[in-house]
């Protein structure tokens, strides 16, 4: 292959960082992963170190002079992060630093090659975005765990914990969701009364709110088993997410992203049903974000009409 025939894509989130290296025909030449690369969550130095680790792994055995373009999608506040990435690229022998992008358009591109459409993301947080010409146009929600993110993993987990502690306060026990959440917090060390168990769960949740987000998987499991309390929470989450989409939707495909919506489960199924019933829209699930970033880096280098055909090779 000729020099300048390789592109790099970076998908740097709060939990993990992924770097993909692709040839212009979509062939994946390298892939690296590391810890969270979100500078808002981890600080610029730690985030850059994580991205650097993933980049080193992805470039292993490759000639850096063959890299022509890069796109880095970074979650969080990355306004002053470009200089750190430029230095990181230079340290790896890469002549040109990456184009820094918000991670939202990249999550959309992970599901669709269409230049315009809508992203609905529900992971720890929740946000919808209208994408126009592969760029962010307008946002809905994404307002954080305290006052927003309706239908997110945190919202679902908190709703599950709240429903269970109120049931315990009423002296009610049993049911898949109650058993799963009480076991999650207390194990086999149960309280003398349901009220005592509720109080202990409240104290643990107040001490560390991050214990609530992982409960979303327990709510989904209980809903799949038909637990009425869990089914009601899953349906409410789906309704919130559909309403979030409604504020920005303006035609085109809808891409589902984030752990709540990329994994099979009651919330994803309910969301798909609501979106398809309301707009008859094409609803697709996002795939690899780092590959999508590499595809965006390659767009201007690809022959006219080839980008959409090559999209699955980059994101698969």
Image (cartoon, rainbow, N blue to C red):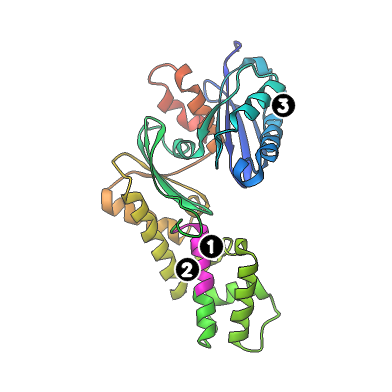
Q: State the residue at coordinates (62%, 82%).
A: 197
Bounds of the magenta segment: 151-162
Question: Can you tell which mark lies on residue 264?
Answer: none
Q: State the residue at coordinates (66%, 42%).
A: 43
Q: Disc 1 designates what residue? A: 216
Question: Is 149 positioned to the left or the right of 54 in the image?
Answer: left
Dot placed on the residue nearer the N-terminal end, 3 or 2: 3
Q: Position of residue 38 (x, y in %)?
A: 61, 42
For the residue pair 261 and 244, the one nearer the viewer reads as: 244
> Quarter of the image holding residue 85?
top right
Callout 1: 10 Å neighbours few (<14), some, many (20+)? many
Secondary structure of the residue carrying numbered label 1 = helix
Whole-Å distance between the Cαs marked 1 and 3?
37 Å
Q: Disc 2 designates what residue? A: 223
**As displayed, is residue 307 above or below residue 110?**
above
Determine whether label 3 and label 2 are within 8 Å by CB: no
Residue 38 shows up from this direction: no
Whole-Å distance between the Cαs marked 3 and 2?
44 Å
Name the magenta segment's main secondary structure. helix
For the residue pair 97 and 79, the one nearer the viewer reads as: 79
**As displayed, is residue 161 above or below residue 252?**
below
Callout 2: 10 Å neighbours few (<14), some, many (20+)? many
Secondary structure of the residue carrying numbered label 3 = loop
Secondary structure of the residue carrying numbered label 2 = helix
Q: State the residue at coordinates (57%, 16%).
A: 5
Query: Which image quarter holds the N terminus?
Result: top right
Question: Can you tell which mark lies on residue 60?
Answer: 3
Determine whether label 1 and label 2 are within 8 Å by CB: no
Q: Position of residue 101 (x, y in %)?
A: 51, 32
Whole-Å distance between the Cαs marked 1 and 2?
10 Å
Q: Position of residue 106 (x, y in %)?
A: 48, 36
């Amino acid at each position: 292959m000729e020099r300048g025939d390789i592109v790099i894509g970076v998908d740097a989130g709060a939990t993990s960082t992924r770097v993909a290296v692709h040839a212009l025909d979509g062939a994946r030449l390298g892939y690296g992963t590391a810890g969270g690369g979100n500078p808002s969550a981890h600080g610029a130095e730690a985030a850059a170190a994580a991205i650097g680790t993933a980049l080193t792994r992805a470039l292993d055995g490759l000639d850096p002079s063959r890299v022509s373009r890069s796109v880095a999608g970074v979650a969080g506040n990355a306004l002053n992060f470009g200089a750190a990435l430029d230095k990181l690229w230079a340290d790896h022998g890469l002549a040109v630093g990456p184009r820094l992008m918000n991670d939202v358009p990249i999550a959309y591109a992970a599901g669709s090659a269409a230049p315009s459409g809508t992203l609905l993301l529900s992971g720890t947080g929740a946000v919808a975005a209208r994408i126009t010409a592969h760029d962010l146009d307008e946002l809905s929600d994404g307002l954080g765990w305290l006052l927003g993110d309706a239908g997110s993993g945190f919202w679902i987990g908190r709703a599950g914990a709240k429903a269970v502690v109120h049931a315990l306060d009423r002296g009610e026990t049993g049911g898949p969701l109650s058993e799963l959440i009480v076991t999650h917090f207390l194990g086999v060390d149960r309280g003398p009364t349901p009220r005592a168990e509720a109080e202990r769960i409240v104290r643990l949740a107040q001490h560390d709110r991050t214990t609530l987000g992982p409960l979303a998987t327990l709510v989904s499991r209980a809903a799949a088993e038909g637990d009425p309390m869990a089914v009601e929470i899953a349906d409410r989450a789906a309704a919130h997410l559909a309403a979030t989409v409604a504020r920005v939707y303006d035609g085109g495909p809808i891409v589902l992203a984030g752990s709540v919506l990329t994994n099979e489960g009651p919330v994803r199924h309910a969301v798909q049903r609501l979106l398809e019933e309301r707009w008859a829209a094409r609803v697709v699930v996002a795939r690899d974000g780092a590959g999508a970033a590499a595809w965006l880096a390659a767009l201007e280098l690809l022959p006219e009409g080839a980008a959409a055909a090559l999209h699955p090779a980059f994101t698969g």
